[in-house]
Each structure stands twice: as C-alpha cells, then as structure tokens.
Image: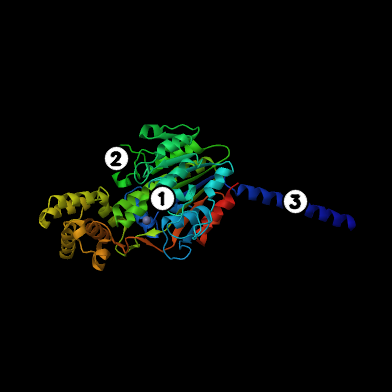
Amino acid sequence: MKRITRQIKRAAFVVLAIALILAAAAGAAEKPKFIFLFIGDGMGEAQVQAADLCSRASGKGGLAFPSLPARGKITTKTAKGAVTDSAAAGTALASGYKTENGILNMDPSKTKRFVTAAMAARDRGMKVGIVTSSFMNDSTPAAFYAYAPSRLDLYGLGKQLAGSGFHYFGGGGLSRRKGKKGDQKDLYEMAAAGGYRVLRSAGDIQSATPGGKVLASGSAGPLPYEIDRRGGAPSLADFTRVGIKLLDNPKGFFMMVEGGLIDWTCHRSDTAALVHDVEAFDNAVKEAMAFARERLGETLIVVTADHETGGMSMGSGATGERLFKLLFQQKESNEKFDLKAAEMRKDRQKSFEKALPVVTDFFGIKALSGEETEELRAAFAQSMKPKAQRKRDKDYNRRYGPYEPLTMAASRILAGRAGVSWTSYGHTGAPVPVYAAGPGAEYFAGERDNTHIGRALFHLLP
Ligand SMILES: [Zn+2]
C-alpha cells in the first residue's frame, strides 16, 4: 500500500512539475518580441465603419484591422474632464497615467513625470520607432518620446526628439524647426548632431538601410492627406515598412504608428478625405500583419484610437454603395477647396450663380435641392466677406465652426447625402475601439479605460 501511495505521489509530482514547466513556457511565450501600436487619431467606430463599407463597395474587400481577433473598447476621459485632446490621451496610451488636456507625460500639477512604454522599451534594449502622418512634434508622437507641461512647445518637443535615442522617426516632418521666431538652432541639425541620419528625399527614404538612428521625412509639416497624395510621395504604409526594415533585430522592437490625419479630416467634416486616410492607416497595419506572419507567435499588433473626432454617426441611409458612389466623386481634400474660396474672395466674386458650378464640380454634388442651394448661398455670402467682418454668432459657429463656410456647407451636404452626420467640429467623449492580435492580445480585449493600454504595454515588455 505504502509503495503504491509513494508511486501515486511521485506521479502527481511529475504531473505538477510538467504543468509548471508548461505554465512557465506559456508565460514566456505570452511576451511578444515585436510590438506594434497603431493609433488612428480621432478614429471612432463610425469612422472605421464608413471606411470599411466604402472599401467593400469598391471591390477591394473589407479593411484588415477590424478583423483582428481580440476586440475591446476604451474610455478616453481625462483626469477631470469628459473630452480629451491628443496630449492627455497620448499620455494615457503611452504611460498608463491620466493627465489634463495640453500636458504630455506629466501629472496635472505639471510637477511629476511619467515614463512611457516606448522609453522603457529603449532602456531594455529594444529598438524603438515612431511613425506619424501628422508632424513629428505633434502631441501623439511626442507622447511617446517627450515630457512637457505644454504640447504647444513644439520646438522643445523637437529638441527632446533629437535627444531621445529612439532608432527611427518616419512620416511628417518637424514643425517650427527653428523655433517660434525662427532664430534658434535648426531641429534637423540637432537631430544630426544627436546621431541621426536625416533622410529627406523619397528615394533615400524608400531605400534606407539598417544601421544607426534614422529620421526620415520629406515633408515640412504633415504628410499630404491620402486623397491628395501624388507623384510617389511615401505613404504611411511606406514609412511603416521602412521602419520594420530598420528596426528588425534579435532583441525586438516597439513601433508606434499614428494615422494623424484621420483626426484632421474629422475636424473639417471631410468624409471623403476621412475614408481615404483610414484606408491609408489600414495599409500601414497590413505591413505589420505581413511581418507578423513571418514572425509567428512573436509579434503583437494593437490598433486603437486616442479619441473620437467630429461626433460622426451613420444614419439608416448609409450603405457601402452610396458612400462609395458619392464620396469618391470628391477628388481632393476639402482643405484644397479653401484655396478656391480664398481666390473667389480675392477676386471679389459677387455672383453665387457663377461660383456654384465650382462648388458642385469639386464635391461632385449634382441636382441640388432648394434647401441645399439656400445653404450654399448663405455660406457663400459669409465666405466672400473678409474674415474679420464675419459675425461669428452661435448660429455661424454651429454651421461652420472655425472653418471656411462654403467648404463646410458643401462638405456637410455631401455627407448628408451619403447618410453621414457630423455633430461637432471638435473631439467628443465617445469610447473608441481596440483591435489586437498576437502574444498578449488578450490584455487588450474587453471594456477598459485608455490608461489600461499603457499599463498592458509595460507589462508585456521584456
Ligand atoms: Zn483633434
């Protein structure tokens, strides 16, 4: 009897030991070697849905990132307020801490600093890359490499970039490169002095080879909107692919890629430009997905947003076919139409009838209803006044926000026809979606607060 008991005990011990080894192996395998964090700035559920429907209707099939297996949702409030900006939200995603709008990686009293997951990844021997379609010292990218009491100190943020030791910066360029008054040392020179190879031409960027630190941007500011991108200018996906090539190494990497212009299109109610920029963002995620297929079980991909912009919603009239058919009539961003409105103003264009075909051609809106014509007529009258002479009352602000009245009226007519409504020119407090795949993806599933993203990233670092 005793012998049998001993044998059972020994067998139980062996089983337990195997279970512990397996658990340890699973624990080790749960940590990814390569981490991608994609942030669609301003990208709420409706933005994803509209772009996905358009993509399907165009015959290209649905977007790739919404099909990632782990799904979640995050709240985006700040330390005290309901509606966040990209600085407070970026801080939460990058460091796991709440702060107030305008502040980067410091507490609301602006005295305590927060380390970011990207900084920690660098300190643990991983290579780190930051890619954005906005300018490189804008709040979302800066939230990963800088601390600042104010997001508006662009020159100071650029200086921190040059000293960050991160291995790759790609996408939009450094804004305010010589300071507010243009009399300070050039930020690109500072980056070069900090050991960065500065690549400015599309050819040099596309053919960049690994070795040392790289700052790759052909733009003075942000990349062009995807709808306006011409002539082989590198896309967000190109900058992501180059980043993968430069960062790939045995110790792993952390790369943050921001679709920064999604937010800009939503501020401007530019539905057509929006769907193009979400698609450009999706193409960047596809680069990471292709890499993940080569490094199976080693690559974590997380896709989320910092907040929703524009209070976008889809009505029952919105179908893929309708969105695609109507929105793809517009061939350039509505920001380009601002230039046409400015020309009309300069020429003292007085005739609405003469201006109307320019508007309808640009936005592809045909057969206007009486109500639509009157909306455009009222907006035209405002747009032809010098900016200082416009009476910006409540009604004006509700209709046009801080933007060009004629552009906004036409954009919202186009959106309305497609079944889309924009209820704000700013950010909203709506929760935003999260998608993830790869080792550790389960940490990003479920309903959470945005600080959870930063904390989960820290947890998953080596
Ligand atoms: Zn914004």
Q: Is residue 119 left or right of residue 393?
A: right
Amino acid type, callout 1 = Asp
Question: Can you identify the residue that label 3 sits on?
Answer: 17
How far across and how far down the image is residue 24, in percent? 68, 49
- Residue 440 can be seen in this image: no
Asked where in the image residue 238 lies, by quadrant, the reply is top left
Q: Secondary structure at mark 1?
A: loop
Asked whether the residues under the numbered discs 2 and 1 touch, taking CB atoms below 8 Å apart as contact, a structural biologist would say no
User: Is residue 192 depicted above or below 364 in this figure?
Assistant: above
Q: Residues within 10 Å of mark 2 (few under 14, many from 20)?
A: few
Taking depth in this image into account, of 63 and 299 the one nearest to the observer is 299
Amino acid type, callout 3 = Ala
Q: How is the image coloured?
A: rainbow
Question: Can you identify the residue that label 2 sits on?
Answer: 230
Amino acid type, callout 2 = Arg
Residue under the point 36% across and 54% down: 263
The quadrant of the picture showing ligand 1 is bottom left
